[in-house]
Image (cartoon, grey):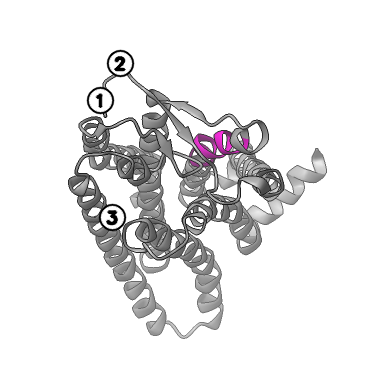
Amino acid sequence: MATFNLTFSEAPTFILTGIPGLEHAHIWISIPFSISYIVVLLGNFTVLLVVGKEQTLHKPMYLLFCMLAITDIIITTSVIPKTLCIFWFNLKVITWGGCLTQAVFYTTLSLVQANVLLAMSFDRYIAICKPLRYNVILSHESIAKIGLVSLIRGLLFMLPLPLLLIRLPFCGNRIIAHTHCLPIAVAKISCGDYTLQSMYGVVIISVNVGLDLTLISLSYYQIIRELLRISSMKMHQKALNTCSSHISVLMLYYIPSFFAIMTPRFGQSIAPHIHVIMANLNILIPSMLNPIIYAVKTKELRDKVKEYIWRK
């Protein structure tokens, strides 16, 4: 059987199957997917518009949340429209360039999102432990630098990804049993050894998650220490309100991500459609709930969103 390497001069096309074993139910599955995607767009764009228009919300916490909203929009838009085209119109073909772009966008923006969540924990630490220096440390210039560093860090870690994918040989099998081009899903249809690709993914995930969770834990350790020194119940309640939304978003990001990333590598006994459904839920659920959590938990943002909706 002929073997070919992926190059842009002679790039093959791939076939995305959708959800393996559930092809007959694609139309019905598309209903919750499309509703969730609409909620993602409405919720995150509403937050961006409200924060952008309201001068009183031009604070570090809300600017960081806007970064989170932008990553949510881009990640879902890089994956879900193609998934819905598979469900609705059976458009399963994707070019090599499109597949590579989707894989790089998804993985890079996921890392950027993790960096923003880390920055948000630092924001909570400064707000509670060093409130008098809050505006000095987290100026608008500092927030812009955080956003740039988050993007650069994500790009640097993902830079080897397309190179590792391009070097893989493919022996005619172009069927990817997924709704989108996850790097590990593309690597698995290769007829070559993709151990390096798989190990690189595990190492990058372990290093990033380990470092980020360590720094986030240190931030909350300092926050708890500071709160134990303060006897004011009002201060405790305020800190709980501001931190609970961030902790909820952290759990929404890390818990589904852990299972979605590890099950394709180590969960061989799990049915293929479970892998695919979990990967899609990992994209949709956090992106859909993040703006809802912040709007409900943060009174200032909630009030401004209400005002904006009523004005419209």
Marks 2 and 1, how far apart in space? 9 Å
Residue at 26% x, 50% y is 201
Residue at 52% x, 50% y is 280
Q: Which x, y percent locates residue 206?
A: 25, 59
Q: Earlier in the sequence, mark 2 or mark 1?
A: 1
Marks 3 and 1, how far apart in space? 29 Å
Q: Which x, y percent locates residue 180?
A: 47, 40
| Labels 2 & 1 near each other (Cβ < 8 A) | yes
Q: Main secondary structure of the magenta part?
A: helix
- Total marks shown come to 3
* Residue closer to the observer: 300 or 6: 6
| Kind of residue at badge 2 | Glu
Q: Which mark is residue 10?
A: 2
| Kind of residue at badge 3 | Ile
Q: Which mark is residue 4?
A: 1
Q: Which residue in the protein does label 3 denote?
A: 205
Which segment did they paint magenta? 74-84
